[in-house]
């Protein structure tokens, strides 16, 4: 629903959508607008809202959309929201089977995800690469318990080619490792691949490994 108000700074007539979700508690809301001002130098409108669910205040930035609308015979400049604060990222949930064989992967992946949400893309890429290493090594240790010490010491690429039997997981983990290495090295080898490709490959690797873990669990159940 659009709100038609006057800007506190210069009485400019403005029309805007208030945020429909609280960035703090996540509830769907109709927030109460507490205060607003416009900085005339940078043409950014700042709004303080109060969430009726959790009672906390949050901030939104708006800018002009260069469109106007007539409302009750007056002309209003329409604004568009460009940012809502605070940004509280939500962790990605992994299946319990995966959490139990590689808690470190889940932790590092989520740290990389938070870095990505905060716009720290260089660090996020390195984080995803590190998460991948824990995922693959922990998975291979789970499959080849007696080789734990060897797997821990080998380079990721060697672990992948020596210990991964499933051809699908093999290709996915190889592709993830190649792009992941690019994220950590000074010179890029694969200019056309980026952090989104890395994440897609890691997510698919996670899916296949999780399938395997869950079907192992089912097999144990059936055989017992
Ligand atoms: Zn709230």
Image (cartoon, grey):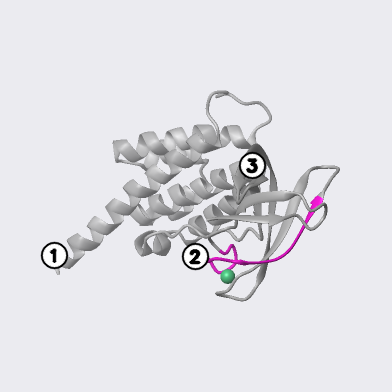
Q: Earlier in the sequence, mark 2 or mark 1?
A: 2
Give the distance between the C-alpha atoms of the residues marked 3 and 2, in whole angstroms. Answer: 30 Å
Give the distance between the C-alpha atoms of the residues marked 2 and 1, in whole angstroms. Answer: 44 Å
Give the distance between the C-alpha atoms of the residues marked 1 and 3, in whole angstroms. Answer: 45 Å
Q: Quadrant of ligand 1?
A: bottom right
Identify the residue at image location x=57%, y=64%.
Answer: 22
**Is 32 drawn above or below residue 65 in the view shown?**
below
Q: Earlier in the sequence, mark 3 or mark 2?
A: 2
Residue neighbourhood size for the residue with mark 1, other residues' Cα within 10 Å, grouped as few (<14), some (14–19), many (≥20): few
Q: Nearer the viewer, residue 21 or 142?
A: 21
**What is the number of the mark on residue 28?**
2
Where are the magenta residues, as a range? Answer: 22-38
Q: Is residue 60 left or right of residue 103?
A: right
Residue under pointer 1? 222
Considering the numbered disc 1 on the image, is that residue within a helix, a strand or a loop?
A: helix
Residue under pointer 3? 121
């Amino acid at each position: 629903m659009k709100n038609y108000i006057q800007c506190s700074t210069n009485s400019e007539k403005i029309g805007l959508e208030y945020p429909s979700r609280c960035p703090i508690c996540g509830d769907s809301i109709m927030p109460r607008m507490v205060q607003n001002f416009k900085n005339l130098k940078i043409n950014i409108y700042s709004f303080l809202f109060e969430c009726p669910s959790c009672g906390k205040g949050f901030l939104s930035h708006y800018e002009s959309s260069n469109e106007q609308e007539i409302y009750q015979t007056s002309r209003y400049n329409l604004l568009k929201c460009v940012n809502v604060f605070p940004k509280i990222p939500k962790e990605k949930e992994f299946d319990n089977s995966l959490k139990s064989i590689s808690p470190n992967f889940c932790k590092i992946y989520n740290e990389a995800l938070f870095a990505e949400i905060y716009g720290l893309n260089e660090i996020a890429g390195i984080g995803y690469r590190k998460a991948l290493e824990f995922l693959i090594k922990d998975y291979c240790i789970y499959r080849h318990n007696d080789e734990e010490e060897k797997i821990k010491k080998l380079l990721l690429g060697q672990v992948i080619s020596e210990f991964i039997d499933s051809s699908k997981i093999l290709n996915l983990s190889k592709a993830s490792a190649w792009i992941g290495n690019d994220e950590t090295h000074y010179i890029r080898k694969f200019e056309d691949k980026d952090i989104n490709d890395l994440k897609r490959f890691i997510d698919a690797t996670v899916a296949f490994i999780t399938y395997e873990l869950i079907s192992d669990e089912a097999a144990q159940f059936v055989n017992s």
